Image: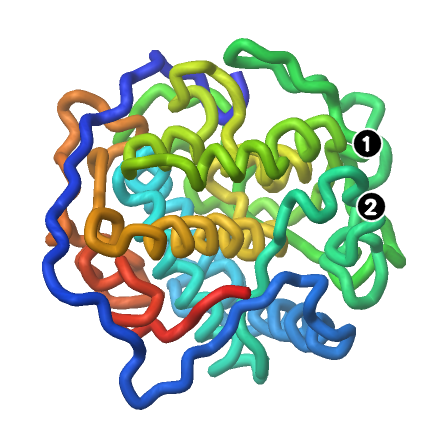
Amino acid sequence: MIWFTVVLLLLGVVNASPFLHKHHSCENNQTTIRREWGQLSVAQRINYTDAVKCLARKPPRLPTKDYPGVRSRFDDFVATHINQTLKVHYSGLFLPWHRRFLHLWETALRDECGYTGYLPYWNWPLWADDLKKSPLFDCSSSSLSGDGEYNPGEQALAGGNVTIPRGSGGGCVPKGCGPFADFEVHLGPFSRNIVSLTELPEPKFDYNPRCLNRSLNHFVATHYTNTTLIDNLMAATNITQFQTAMDHWPARPDGVFGLHGGGHFSLGAAMQDLFASPQDPAFMLHHGMIDRLWTNWQAQDEKNRRYAVNGTTTILNPPWGQKVTLDTVMEFGVLDRPRRIREVMSPTAGGFCYTYT
C-alpha cells in the first residue's frame, strides 16, 4: 500500500468551533499576492529557484550532531516536516500546520536568500494533460526541472481499491534538465509501511545523499488533480467533507486518491515519501495550491468556515487521539515558536497578509 499500510480508521466527527471574532483584513500592510507559476515571468521564476538553491547552500540551524542528515537551511524544513509528520497528516492539523509551514518557507526565501516575490502555486488542472509541457516541469531554466530518467524497475502503484500505472521516469533528474538537475537530497527515504502512529520510524534523520528522483505520471495527474475533483471539493458544506475530498487513501473511505495525494503521486518517489517529500522543490507549490483552495473555501462562508476544525492531533485520527480545538498548539521546531491553530486560520490575520490569484 502506498505511503504506509495501516488499518483504515474512520475520520473523526466534526469539531467545528464557533466564529469567534470578526474576520479582518491586514492592518497597515499591503496584501501580497501569491500567483500561479505560469503567471510569473521567466525572471521571476528564476529568482524563485535561485533562492531555493540558496537555502540549500546555507548552513542549517539544526545541529548536525543530532540531525546528521541536515546539511542546510533547506534541510531544516525537511527535518521539521519529518519530525511532525505523524501529527500533521490525515489529521486536524494538516491544513493549519502546512499553512504556517508555507509562510515560514516564503519568509526564509525572502529574508535569507534575496527572493523578491511571494510563494507561487501549482494549479494542477492547467497542466494535468501533459506535465512535461508545463512551465513547471519542462526542463527549461525557468522550471522546477522535469522528469527523471527512465527506470525500468519502477513498479505500478497498488493500494486501496485501485492500481495506478507507473510514471514515465523513475530515475534521477538528468543533467541539463533545469535548475535542479544536480540537486542533492539528504534525508530518507522512508518506508511506505508504518507500524506506529506515534513513533518516528527509521531512518529518522540519517544522512543519505542521493539525486532528486522524479517520475511524471499522466494517469494520476488527469484522474486525481482535475477540475471535477476541485469542484467537488469546493462544494463541500463542512470541514469534514472538505478534508475527505482533499485527502487520499487510506484516510478516504472510498479508498482512492484525493487532490492532496494526486499532486504528490503525479511526480514520483521523492514526492511520494510521506515524511521527506519537501525535498522535492515542487512540494511547496503543491501545498500552495492546497492552501489556495482552503482559503477560497473558507471565504465562501466566513461565519461557519473561517474557524472550523475537525479531527485529532494524531495521524489518521485514531479514536484515542486528542481532538483539535482552536487552542491546540502546533510545533515548528527550529523554524518558529509554537503556534495555536487560531493564529493561522486566516491568511490576512495573525501575521499573515496574503491572497491568491
Residue drawn at point x = 22 percent, y = 43 percent:
309
Q: Amino acid at mark 2?
A: Lys
> Is residue 310 shown above or below 325?
above
> Is residue 150 shown above or below 346?
above
Farthest residue, direction bottom: 28
Give the residue pinned by disc 1: 168
Residue drawn at point x = 82 percent, y = 29 percent:
151
Q: Is residue 262 left or right of residue 304?
A: right
Q: Position of residue 355 (x, y in %)?
A: 45, 68
Residue 203 visible in the current orientation = no
Farthest residue, direction right: 176
Viewer-nearest of discs 2 and 1: 2
**Secondary structure type for disc 2:** helix
Q: Is residue 219 left or right of residue 280?
A: right
Q: Position of residue 175 (x, y in %)?
A: 87, 54
Q: Quadrant of the C terminus?
A: bottom right
- The answer to whether the residues at label 2 and label 1 have Cβ atoms under 8 Å apart is yes
Q: Is residue 166 left or right of residue 291?
A: right
Q: CA distance from mark 2 to mark 1?
A: 10 Å
How many numbered tags mark residues here? Answer: 2
Q: Amino acid at mark 1?
A: Ser
Residue drawn at point x = 52 percent, y = 19 percent:
256
Q: Which mark is residue 132?
A: 2
> Is residue 50 shown above or below 274?
below
Mark 1 residue crowding within 10 angstroms, few (<14) / some (14–19) / many (20+): many
